[in-house]
Image (cartoon, rainbow, N blue to C red):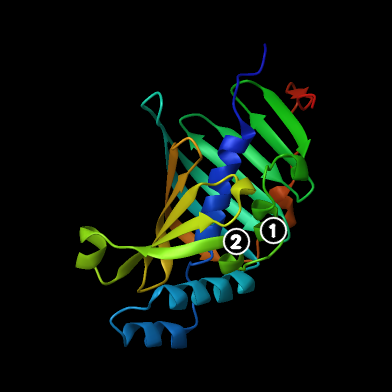
């Protein structure tokens, strides 16, 4: 059976958007939360500074996710969900449970793409998967958002009516970033990202909503290892 046409890059861009957003999760020092609560709300520079501090302190994280991908030209919408794990340096486990099972996992060197439905698995060097250095930089622990993005706040009726949240608009400073725009919807009471929206160059969007976020829980390296099960066809990567 020939493998179905599914772009790894299309999935891994949401992974990176999710990863950038997750650094805003629980674990913000109490002093920072108290300072934020004492004001009407932090400005963009304050939020970004907290993001960078927490990002630098995050060694591993996990969450549940719901993902909605909209194809602008076709008007098609695809939904899915599952679990996500990340451990620095470079380890990621991105596992879909719906609409069908599928696993992307890397130990920091090799990316495995496994489809239980197709009974197929692909292996590829991680640094060959991305068209941009940004995802690899984040996975290595590089958290300098202002160096790579122009960041502003999004103001609309919904955010103005809710002083407990802020939407950050991140636009890459380099055209080769592989991401046209990214929105992070931040809950200012706990500095958690409740929603991440990714726009690609064609105007397609990927929206990821997060629940059950955990930081620095001590994830095992074994959770980022993969051995193809018996009976699974290992498909070589496409020729370049």
Labelled pair 1, 2 in contact (Cβ < 8 Å): yes
Instruction: Quarter of the image for the N terminus: give it.
Output: top right
Instruction: Quarter of the image for the C terminus: give it.
Output: top right
Q: Earlier in the sequence, mark 1 or mark 2?
A: 1
- Quarter of the view holding residue 41: bottom left
Is 81 placed left or right of 110 in the picture?
Answer: left
Is 39 placed left or right of 134 in the picture?
Answer: left
Determine the residue positioned at 68% across, 57% down: 139
Query: Can you say whether 106 is above or below 232 in the image?
Result: below
Residue 77, position as x, y percentages in the image: 38, 30
- Asked whether 102 or 89 is in front, the reply is 89
- Asked whether 135 or 180 is in front, the reply is 180
Q: Secondary structure at mark 1?
A: helix
Q: Residues within 10 Å of mark 1 (few under 14, many from 20)?
A: some
Q: Secondary structure at mark 2?
A: helix
Determine the residue positioned at 62% across, 74% down: 57
Q: Give the distance between the C-alpha atoms of the residues marked 1 and 2, in whole angstroms.
A: 11 Å
| Disc number placed over residue 137 in the picture, else none | 1
Residue 69, position as x, y percentages in the image: 43, 36
Residue 143, position as x, y percentages in the image: 62, 67
Q: Residues within 10 Å of mark 2 (few under 14, many from 20)?
A: some
Is residue 25 something one can see in this rendering? yes
| Residue under numbered circle 2 | 148
- Quarter of the view holding residue 203: top left
Determine the residue positioned at 61% across, 19% down: 4
Determine the residue positioned at 28% across, 81% down: 40
Is residue 22 something one can see in this rendering? no
């Amino acid at each position: 059976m020939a493998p179905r046409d599914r772009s790894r890059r299309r999935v891994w861009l949401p992974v990176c958007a999710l990863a950038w957003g997750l650094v805003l999760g629980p674990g913000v020092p109490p002093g920072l939360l108290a300072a934020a609560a004492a004001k009407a709300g932090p400005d963009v520079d304050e939020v970004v500074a907290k993001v960078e501090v927490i990002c630098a302190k995050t060694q591993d994280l996990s969450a549940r996710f719901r993902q909605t991908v909209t194809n602008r030209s076709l008007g098609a919408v695809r939904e899915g969900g599952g679990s996500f794990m990340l451990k620095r340096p470079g380890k990621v486990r991105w596992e879909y449970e719906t609409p069908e099972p599928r696993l992307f996992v890397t130990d920091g060197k090799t990316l495995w793409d496994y489809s239980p439905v197709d009974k197929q698995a692909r292996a590829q060097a991680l640094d060959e998967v991305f068209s941009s250095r940004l995802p690899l930089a984040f996975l290595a622990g590089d958290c300098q958002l202002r160096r790579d993005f122009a960041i502003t706040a999004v103001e609309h009726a919904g955010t103005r009516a809710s002083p407990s949240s802020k939407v950050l608009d991140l636009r890459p400073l380099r055209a080769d970033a592989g991401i046209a725009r990214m929105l992070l919807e931040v809950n200012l009471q706990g500095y958690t990202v409740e929603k991440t929206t990714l726009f690609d160059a064609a105007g397609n969007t990927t929206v990821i909503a997060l629940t059950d976020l955990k930081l620095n829980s001590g994830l095992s390296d074994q959770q980022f290892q993969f051995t193809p099960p018996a009976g699974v066809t290992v498909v070589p990567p496409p020729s370049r």
